[in-house]
Amino acid sequence: MIVTIDGPAGAGKSSAARQLAKRLGFHFLDTGAMYRAVVYTAIERGIDLTDADALEQVAASIDIQLTDDSVLVDGQDVTRAIRTQAITTATRYAADHPGIRARLVELQRAAAEGQDFVTEGRDQGSIVFPNAECKVFLTASERVRAERRYHDLISRGEDLTFDDVLEKQQQRDERDATRPVGALIQADDAVVLVTDGMSAEEVVDRLHDIVMQHR
Ligand code: DC
């Protein structure tokens, strides 16, 4: 069974999808981590992110391993390093690149082959797994999403203001919605879950109910 969870930045997809997968005993795929890993590696190698060919070369050459709670690039643990605000902002160079998207979509489909899977991102229900048995569009109001992300970044030791986070989120929403390939689209057959006012546990409970209704 494939469960797709798509939605905008800060909707709480990653942690909810990870917990849901644990509860169901399914594998979990955080597809945003793959785009982040490509950009992180390119920066580490001193590559100019606007050089589309060089960036595509990085995506084609690296080995990305996603376990249930860590991200490894060529064996190096980058789990925390790919979550900074700087990488979050720069990740658009990979996400906007059609060749890189094609490569990562291929890897995502291969990872899910023959497995029970919870996968989260922007295009999972619409493009990558259009025949998924259960699709969820997880969202929350702009302010709630920015507040969650602000608290998350502060707790990781980053120095920024709420207004910075809100402004960057608005730019990211705009890019996610208008990207020519792999834009954030709500699949016609997705169940919409708005998480304003819900605790993390309540979100997982609701997601679990939705999956059970699609089994
Ligand atoms: O979910 P996230 O914040 O880790 O995603 C990082 C970036 O990657 C985000 O700006 C959108 C992009 N992304 C994408 O284009 N397609 C996906 N399936 C997942 C993420």
Image (cartoon, rainbow, N blue to C red):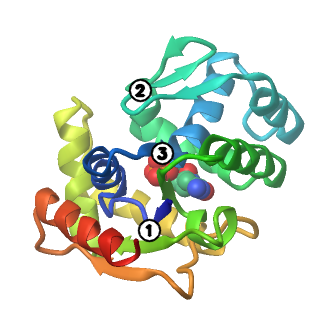
Whether tag 2 and tag 3 are in contact, CB under 8 A, the answer is: no
The mark lying in front, picked from 2 and 1, is: 2
- What residue type is disc 1 on? Gly
Give me the C-alpha separation between circle 2 and circle 1. Answer: 21 Å
Q: Quadrant of residue 107?
A: top right
Q: Is residue 136 left or right of residue 102?
A: left
Q: Does residue 61 lie above or below 5 as drawn?
A: above
- What residue type is disc 2 on? Ser
Which residue in the protein does label 3 denote?
30
Q: Of marks 1 and 3, which one's residue comes earlier in the chain? A: 1
Which residue in the protein does label 2 denote?
70
Q: Please provide percent x and percent y for residue 117.
A: 48, 51
Which image quadrant: the C terminus? Answer: bottom left
Q: Does residue 42 lie above or below 100 as drawn?
A: above
Between 22 and 193, which is closer to the camera in this rendering?
Answer: 22
Residue sitting at 29 percent across and 53 percent down? 20
Q: Does residue 104 lie above or below 59 as drawn?
A: below
Q: Residue furthest bottom?
A: 188
Q: Please provide percent x and percent y for residue 26.
A: 40, 46
Observer able to see residue 24: yes
* Secondary structure of residue under mark 3: strand
- What residue type is disc 3 on? Asp
The disc label shown at residue 7, or none: 1
Q: Please provide percent x and percent y for residue 142.
A: 31, 73
How many residues crowd around disc 3 within 10 Å: few (fewer than 14), some, or many (20 or more)?
many
Residue sitting at 18 percent across and 75 percent down? 196
* Secondary structure of residue under mark 2: loop
Residue sitting at 49 percent across and 68 percent down? 173
* Secondary structure of residue under mark 1: loop
